[in-house]
């Protein structure tokens, strides 16, 4: 007697961040894909301090990142000297901050771009800030302004995730004996913090045809019986695809078959350890970078 098969998702899917693989491509397309794959995630999200400049009551902290980073993916914020962890946000009335990116066109991350965080101080209001302190050294009245500048790179998504950042502790020494002017400036990188940003991505698994297109309602309504071939496609969901997430492999996929009676439920593996199951009932079609992975199983 032939029995119906019930598909149960007992599976693990691993994603690929990058460009999709190409089943059939022209030489020109292959070169384009190869060029883009040469750019690693580390290069795309690179963030390097590039010194500082100052004059009178304004100065800037300079950074280098890649052309993968658009203007909307950059944020800068000032804190008290404890920085973000334990610090307090500095209001614009104490220090005015402006983000100044260069005009480099957006790219895939193979080119560099320069970004400056410009900070301006008002001599009439800074003395009332908790960043400010005074002391007399060798008969000279000196003031110190100390704070932390944080520059970060974020994902270009509805809920932005900080991927990389640098925190810099800035100490301004001001000579008050002959007016209000910056005498020296000290810039010190804060000890690196170990940060892990995680993002959960979902997948879509569906019965599909040989072109990896979803089956119609009438095709799905047809009973799957013992001995028939079932094709299943797995792909990242729409949100993941927008963020250039592709399939890397299917770690495992199992079917449950209900024979009823004394036999009851029987587990039939289709994918095991990223390969077609050893029962020789499955053909697996999945290459790292594929937009869709698929497999065919005899029920």
Image (cartoon, rainbow, N blue to C red):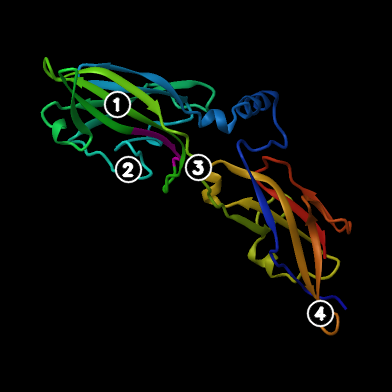
Callout 3 secondary element: loop
Point out the image quarter for the N terminus: bottom right
- The tag earlier along the polypeptide, 1 or 3, is 1
Separation of disc 1 and disc 3 at Cα?
A: 25 Å
Q: Is residue 152 magenta?
A: yes
- The tag earlier along the polypeptide, 1 or 2, is 2
The answer to whether the residue labelled 1 contacts the one labelled 4, judged by CB atoms less than 8 Å apart, is no
Q: Report the magenta residues as a range.
A: 149-156
Separation of disc 2 and disc 3 at Cα?
A: 17 Å
- Main SS, magenta region, reads strand
Dot 2 alpha-carbon crowd within 10 angstroms: few under 14, some 14 to 19, many 20 or more:
some
Separation of disc 4 and disc 2 at Cα?
A: 61 Å
Residue 41, image x and y in percent?
57, 33
Dot 1 alpha-carbon crowd within 10 angstroms: few under 14, some 14 to 19, many 20 or more:
some
**Viewer-proximal residue among 252 and 198:** 198
Dot 4 alpha-carbon crowd within 10 angstroms: few under 14, some 14 to 19, many 20 or more:
few
Residue 81, image x and y in percent?
32, 36
Closer to the camera: disc 4 or disc 2?
Answer: 2
Instruction: Residue under label 3, please give it.
Output: 195
Instruction: Residue under label 2, please give it.
Output: 87
Q: Is residue 140 magenta?
A: no
**Viewer-proximal residue among 118 and 72:** 118
Give the answer, above or below, for where 181 lies relative to 124.
Answer: above
* Residue under the point 18% across and 28% down: 134
Instruction: Residue under label 4, please give it.
Output: 264
Residue 133 in sight in this render: yes
């Amino acid at each position: 007697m032939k029995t119906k098969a019930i598909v149960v998702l007992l599976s693990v899917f691993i994603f690929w961040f990058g460009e999709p693989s190409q089943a059939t491509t022209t030489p020109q397309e292959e070169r384009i894909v190869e060029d883009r794959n040469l750019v690693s995630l580390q290069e795309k999200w690179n963030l390097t301090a590039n010194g500082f400049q100052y004059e009178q009551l304004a100065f800037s902290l300079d950074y280098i990142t890649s052309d993968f980073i658009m203007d909307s993916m950059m944020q800068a914020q000032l804190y008290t000297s404890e920085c973000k962890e334990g610090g307090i946000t500095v209001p614009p009335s104490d220090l005015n901050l402006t983000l100044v990116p260069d005009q480099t066109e957006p790219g895939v991350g193979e080119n560099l771009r320069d970004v400056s965080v410009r900070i301006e101080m008002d001599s009439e209001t800074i003395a009332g800030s908790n960043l400010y302190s005074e002391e007399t050294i060798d008969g000279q009245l000196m003031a110190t302004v100390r704070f932390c500048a944080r520059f970060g790179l974020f994902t270009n998504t509805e809920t932005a995730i900080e991927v990389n950042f640098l925190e810099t502790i800035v100490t301004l020494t001001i000579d008050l004996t002959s007016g209000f002017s910056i005498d020296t400036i000290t810039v010190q990188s804060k000890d690196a913090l170990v940060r892990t940003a995680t993002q959960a991505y979902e997948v879509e698994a569906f019965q599909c045809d040989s072109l990896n297109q979803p089956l119609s309602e009438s095709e799905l309504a047809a009973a799957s019986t013992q001995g028939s071939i079932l094709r299943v496609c797995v792909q990242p969901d729409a949100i993941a695809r927008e963020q250039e997430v592709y399939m890397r492999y299917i770690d495992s996929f199992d079917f449950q078959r209900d024979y009823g009676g004394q036999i009851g439920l029987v587990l039939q593996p289709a994918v095991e350890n990223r390969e077609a199951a050893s029962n020789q009932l499955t053909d697996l079609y999945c290459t790292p970078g594929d937009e869709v992975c698929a497999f065919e199983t005899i029920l």
